[in-house]
Image (cartoon, grey):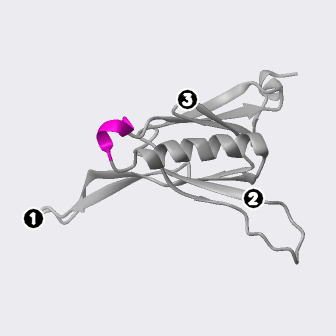
Amino acid sequence: MTASLQTLLALTARFHVSVQGVDLGGWARCQGLEVTFNSVPVTDGGNYQYQTILPGEIKYSKVVLQRAISKQDTQKVLGWLQDRAANWIDGHKSGGGGTATIILFDSRGSEVTRWMLRNVYPESWKGPDLDAMSVGVAMEQLVLVHEGFL
């Protein structure tokens, strides 16, 4: 086999999340690992050939995590959220947003890559919609805001 055929590819279904050293477990879905480099076009007087492009603000999207509720992992998330809520107003106690790590694995469980999100805060958590008239999996969603991963 050639070297390129032996390479194990990352699997979108295999990733793990921790925030501020708290292991939040595996998740079923992660959306928003995205960065946008905004440019600022400037028109120079007397230059009719092109617009000068200057670097603008770099923006990062919110990270949205979703999974089925499990007793162990959901309790870790709720514990982390309780800590954040207790220190939400008093910035001196909060210690800042901390760091979140998202690790992506291949089919053998080896790390392929990781993203380290700076100054992470929870934006929201949503629990399951409970309905005795339907059958489904109880899902949770955690939305994180951050200052970037580059």
User: Can you tell which of label 1 and label 2 is closer to the viewer?
Assistant: 2
Looking at the image, which residue is at 31% across and 43% down?
Answer: 91
Dot 3 amino acid type? Gly
Magenta-colored span: 90-95
Q: Residue at x 32, y 45 (%)?
A: 90
- Whether 69 is drawn above or below 19: the answer is below
Tell me which numbered mark, 3 or 2, is placed earlier along the sequence: 3
Q: Residue 111, labelled with which disc?
A: none
Residue under label 2:
139
Judged from this view, the residue extending furthest toward the front is 86
Along the viewing direction, whichever of 37 and 11 lies nearer the viewer: 11
**Can you give x and y, in whole percent of width and height, for residue 61 in the image?**
48, 55
Q: Mark on residue 45?
A: 1
Q: Looking at the image, tell me whether mark 1 or mark 2 is earlier in sequence order.
A: 1
> Looking at the figure, which quarter contains the N terminus?
top right
Which of the 4 image quarters holds residue 133?
bottom right
Secondary structure state at the residue bearing disc 2: strand
Frontmost of labels 1 and 3 is 3
Three-letter amino acid code at disc 2?
Met
Residue at mark 3: 21
Is 67 contained in the magenta span? no
| Classed neighbour count for the residue bearing mark 2: other residues with Cα under 10 Å, few (<14), some (14–19), many (≥20) | some
Magenta span: chief secondary structure: helix
Disc 3 crowd, CA 10 A, few/some/many (<14, 14-19, 20+): few
Question: Residue at 73% of width from left, 69% of height from top?
Answer: 129
**In the drawing, does residue 118 fall left or right of residue 53?**
right
Q: How would you rate the neighbour count of disc 1 (Cα within 10 Å): few for under 14, some for 14-19, many for 20 or more? A: few
